[in-house]
Amino acid sequence: MKLSLLCSATLFTLATYAFPANLLNNDLSAEALAEITEIAAKITREAETKRQLGASILPPGFDADAQRISTTGKWRYIPPGPDDIRGPCPGLNVMANHGYLPRNGIASVVQMTLASNEVFGMGLDLSAFLSVYASVMGGNITAASIGGKPKRQEGLLGLVGGLVTGLDLLGEPQGLSATHNRFEADCSPTRADLYKTGDPVSLNVPQFEQLYAMPLGPNGYDLTVMHPFRGKRFKDSVATSDRNGLV
């Protein structure tokens, strides 16, 4: 846990923006660096706009129809193949299954940032931070497997446009499945706790069935459903495990 907090603080201060671009200038292609610079500029503009408007401005309400995304054509569902990687995060899995992330399950920081913003409407600042953090914990700063260890490490490195030096701060990249209680955590709605079952990655069917049986909120499985269910999972986890990673 101390390592997670240290890395979080480090990522916030690596550069002016959410990306450690200065650290990677010599290792990224011009195209990849331009993408990162563009996102960083957007984050800065959004932050300045929020500052000028002030915190009293009410955010727009949720409009499901206005926020629909395509699931046809190039974005159609294709089940993962035998060499495709999937992991403990349903959101990352579904984006890979629909092609918003590379279908092989290995994605760069830029790809994860833009996909999270486009598909889920996550703010660029938050999605950029989480993407960098995921890549530090489970990848090589610039890219990460959304599940287990990539079978071929050169596939991970090749995604980022000419990365030629090793940036594996925590050793050889193992993927997000190996980041339990550093990125992924106990009390997941659909995954078991690490020290309770030894498997925090696979779908826990009884937990999923409990969630599926919850009464739907105004917008389906929205915060009015997920918030109390997550609270229940936290209480159950604390009551049944003396090694809960969040306590």
Image (spheres, rainbow, N blue to C red):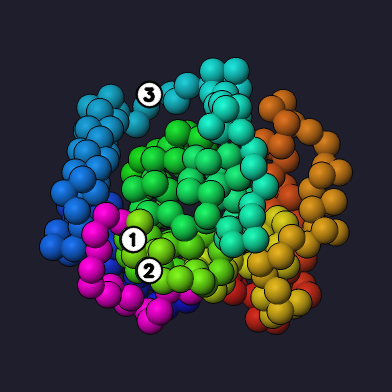
Is the stretch drawn in magenta largely helix, strand or loop?
Answer: loop
* Sequence order check, earlier mark of 3 and 1: 3
Residue drawn at the location 48% of the way across and 62% of the way down: 145
Q: Is mark 1 on a helix, strand or loop?
A: helix
The amino acid sitting under disc 2 is Glu
Check disc 2: other Cα within 10 Å, few if <14, some if 14-19, many if 20+: few
Check disc 3: other Cα within 10 Å, few if <14, some if 14-19, many if 20+: few
Please, is residue 118 above or below residue 180 in the view? above
Q: What element carries label 3?
A: loop
Q: Is mark 2 on a helix, strand or loop?
A: helix
- Tell me if residue 13 can be seen: no
Q: Examine the structure image and report whether residue 162 is included in the region drawn in magenta.
A: yes
Residue 170 location, x and y as percent?
A: 37, 79
* Residues at marks 2 and 1 touching, judged by CB atoms closer than 8 Å: yes
Q: In which quarter of the image is residue 57?
A: top left
**Residue that label 1 marks:** 158
**Residue that label 2 marks:** 154
Q: Is residue 177 left or right of residue 31?
A: right
**The magenta segment:** 160-174
**Residue that label 3 marks:** 57
